[in-house]
Amino acid sequence: MRTVTATAAAVTTTLLGAGAAAVAIGRYAADAALRPEPGRPLPGGPRLSVHSAGEDRVALTRSLVSLRPGTYGLAAPGVHAAVGPVLPDADHDPDTVVRRLLSVTHGRLDPGTRVTLTPQVYAGNPRSALGLDHADVDVPGELGALPAWFVPSVRDTWVITVHGLGGTREHPMVVMPFLHRHRLPVLDLAYRGDLGAPASPDGLGHLGESEWRDLDAAIRYALRYGARRVILHGWSTGATMALHALERSALADRISGLVLDSPVLDWHTTLRGLAAAHRTPAVVLPLAVRSAEGRTGLRADRRPPGADPGALRVPVLIFHGPDDALAPWEPSRRLAEARPDLITLHTVPGAGHGAMWNADPAGYEEALRRFLTPLM
């Protein structure tokens, strides 16, 4: 009897220990998924080897990612470059892809360099990267000063741009030349957790649930310094922040439109994708997601942004595609179907998360032109 009791106690202790370890691993994985790393590409995408690089072309490891159409950045520690389309007629080995090399901002693309294809095409600031005059400004936020770039122009409708997961305020520079040609002032915001901005109190990202208040501060700043109306253009969690601002801001009546690129509308799936991308073991993935939901307040009983399509009252343009593995496309499609009077969905097949412009710059900007023209 004593042996059975001792054995049962040992098994119970072992199970409790294993359970506690699993919970600890889940919490650790949740922290890794939610702790922002400004400027570091999202995990999960394959790293590509540089095979060779010349004045105007670069050969990369052949994969579905390196074959994506469009314009992208190449990132590695100490390295940033921009590449254009695949050059199908260029000489190359069977295991490589040759793309147009547009620029090398810093570092070198030496053979063997391991790079990641990212949506961030430009590095630097609007003047150094694009030749656009700008001012470095500080937006007063609830946690402290939020650095931003202001690119001036003549209209009194401003576009406030806000990046998303894995990005910095350099990412929205892809649309700055277009917006500048259409004489729209741009306020490009860095928010809590970004380099130069205050950290969130718990050091974690909240997928827009708390970060939207920094965007609200940017709206106040724009109205204080000359804007009569604002258009919010967000990527990923930046798009989620824009929806939150429309739903919650006391200044929502000054928002004339939203542009949502790869919006995060399904928290659970995105949290699961972030945790999985950090190589969380499958057996503890549910614990990691549950821990992340608890720590961020994004529980299943909370209404995600856009849950009430009837509450929308301004035109909305959504760029999204069925190949986005991090923010599912289906919620965007359902939202657009629910409000065809206000929402335009521009579908971008073959594009990764936050890379709708990259996959088809001309198509993206034409859809943006049609949407913005009546709002200017």
Image (spheres, helix red, strand yellow):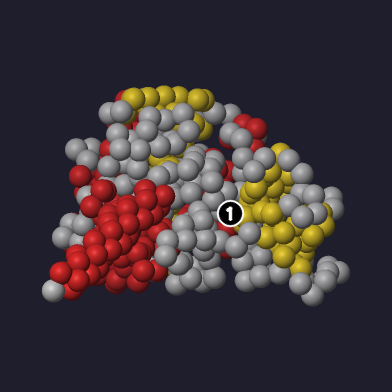
Number of residue marks: 1
Work out whether residue 156 or residue 336 is closer to the camera in this orientation and state it.
336
Quadrant location of the C terminus in the rendered image: top left
Question: Residue 18 placed where, x, y %?
Answer: 30, 62
Report helix, strand or loop for mark 1: strand
Residue 197 relative to residue 219: left or right = right
Outermost residue, front side: 2
Work out whether residue 181 or residue 328 is closer to the camera in this orientation and state it.
328
Q: Residue 66 occupies which quadrant of the picture? A: bottom right
Asked if residue 265 is positioned above or below residue 131 in the image, the reply reads below
Question: Residue 44 placed where, x, y %?
Answer: 52, 61
Q: Is residue 367 visible?
A: no
| Badge 1 density bin: few <14, some 14–19, many ≥20, Cα 10 Å | many
Report the residue at 45% width, 24% height from top: 137
Report the residue at 83% width, 71% height from top: 93
Report the residue at 67% width, 60% height from top: 48
Q: Residue 330 occupies which quadrant of the picture? A: bottom left
Asked if residue 318 is positioned above or below residue 165 in the image, the reply reads below
Q: Amino acid at mark 1?
A: Thr
Question: Residue 94 placed where, x, y %?
Answer: 79, 75
Q: Residue 215 occupies which quadrant of the picture? A: top left
Q: Is residue 285 visible?
A: yes
Quadrant location of the N terminus in the rendered image: bottom left
Question: Residue 289 placed where, x, y %?
Answer: 31, 60
Report the residue at 28% width, 59% height from top: 17
Residue 105 relative to residue 286: left or right = right
The residue pinned by badge 1 equals: 118
Asked if residue 20 is positioned above or below residue 187 in the image, the reply reads below
